[in-house]
Image (cartoon, grey):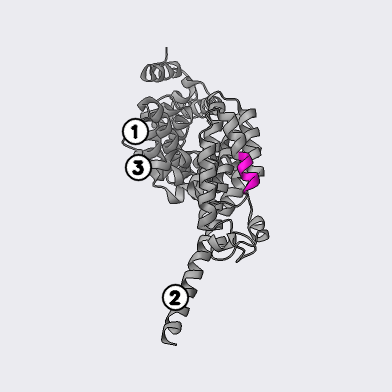
Amino acid sequence: MRTATIQKPIMIVVISFLFSLGVLQVFGWQDKISPVSDYQYKKDYAQYEGIKKEADAQKRADLLLGFMKERPISRMLTYVVADYLECVRPHIQGKNWAKVIAMEEALAALMPTEKTVQAAAVPEPGAGEFLKNVLAPAHRTVQSALLAANYQAGNLPKAAEIGERLYAAAPDRGMAAALADIYIKLNNADKFATYAEKVVAEIPIEQSYTLALQLAGVYQQKNDLAKASGYAAKVMEAFGDKVPQGVQESVWNGSRAYAFGLLGLHAYANKDYPKTLEYYGKATQFSPKSDDAWYYTGMAKWRSQDPEGAIQAFAKCVVINKTMAKKAQEYLEQLYKARHNDTLDGLDQVLAKAKSELGIS
């Protein structure tokens, strides 16, 4: 009696262990083998290893699709997906995007879903582990590959559609950055701002300064100078006196002039003329032929009771001869006449001096 008492729990443990391996299913102890059991994993692994021996990439891709049709739920899914996408790589290198998309869509069509797992009556906790550790990462890998292929093929709306689904399922800053890039190319300012702001909020400005400057431009177009100058200020706090790694200084000078110009424009809108002159002074330092910088410098000096300084600034705006030149000419003549007995005598000398200082022939 004592021996039987001891052996009974041992037998229960052994049977449970064999069930976990899937061994007892072979002998009819269970209706069917669990597709996520260790026993089935070993069988799937052996089949997959055989497929890997096929040297021809297209034939191997077809065999891998056949494996997925036969074994829609398998712990080998991650490896099958990775190997299949490796078979697609030659077409990516050849920029044959139609072929790439066709192959990746064929793979996506065979990807199992949560409903597939439920229909197969995969026991817990095996089902939960498969969904979390195998299916979700594999699904994201395939969809990300499709996003990239459609992006390269120029089908940006489709790329955006895929990206939106991926971000909704698992928000992350990498996908947010990808969506921001897609939407700026689609000229969708609102969608761009939605995702770009998520990236800038999470990544240090030293890494996200390009997006921040683009956001500044979007908000300037919306006439939201507070937000526009806010992003410009963040970038200039990090790079106002240095150049980002990998960027040419001449190119960055244009970005600095733009950012300081936004700060100056916001200050001018708030009637803070000392700050206006400070920021536009920096803007003209980095881009001496910025007509709007000289125009608002002239306006700020005029408002600050410095008409002579305003004349010099307006003269520079005029000789640069861009968008703001006509309005600057009106104010220049008005100020000059007020100081020269209502005549323009000598104004040509002021304009010649402005040209000389700017290096304009």
* Disc 1 secondary structure class: loop
- Label count reads 3
* Disc 3 secondary structure class: helix
Residue in view at x 61 percent, y 47 percent: 164
Q: Earlier in the sequence, mark 1 or mark 3?
A: 3
Residue closest to the eye, 287 or 123: 123
- For badge 1, the amino acid type reads Gln
- For badge 3, the amino acid type reads Ala
Which residue bears the numbered disc 3?
Answer: 238
Q: Quadrant of the N terminus?
A: bottom left
Q: Main secondary structure of the magenta part?
A: helix
Which residue bears the numbered disc 1?
Answer: 245
Residue in view at x 63 percent, y 40 percent: 66
Residue in view at x 67 percent, y 43 percent: 109
222 within the magenta span: no
Which residue bears the numbered disc 2?
Answer: 10
**Dot 3: few (<14), some (14–19), or many (≥20) neighbours within 10 Å?**
some
Q: Are marks 2 and 3 in contact (CB under 8 Å)?
A: no
Expressed as whole percent of the image width and height from the top left, the position of residue 215 reads: 51, 42
Frontmost of labels 1 and 3 is: 1
The magenta segment is: 65-71
**Residue 264 falls in image quadrant:** top left
Q: Earlier in the sequence, mark 2 or mark 3?
A: 2
Frontmost of labels 2 and 1 is: 2
Q: Earlier in the sequence, mark 2 or mark 1?
A: 2
Which mark is drawn over residue 302? none
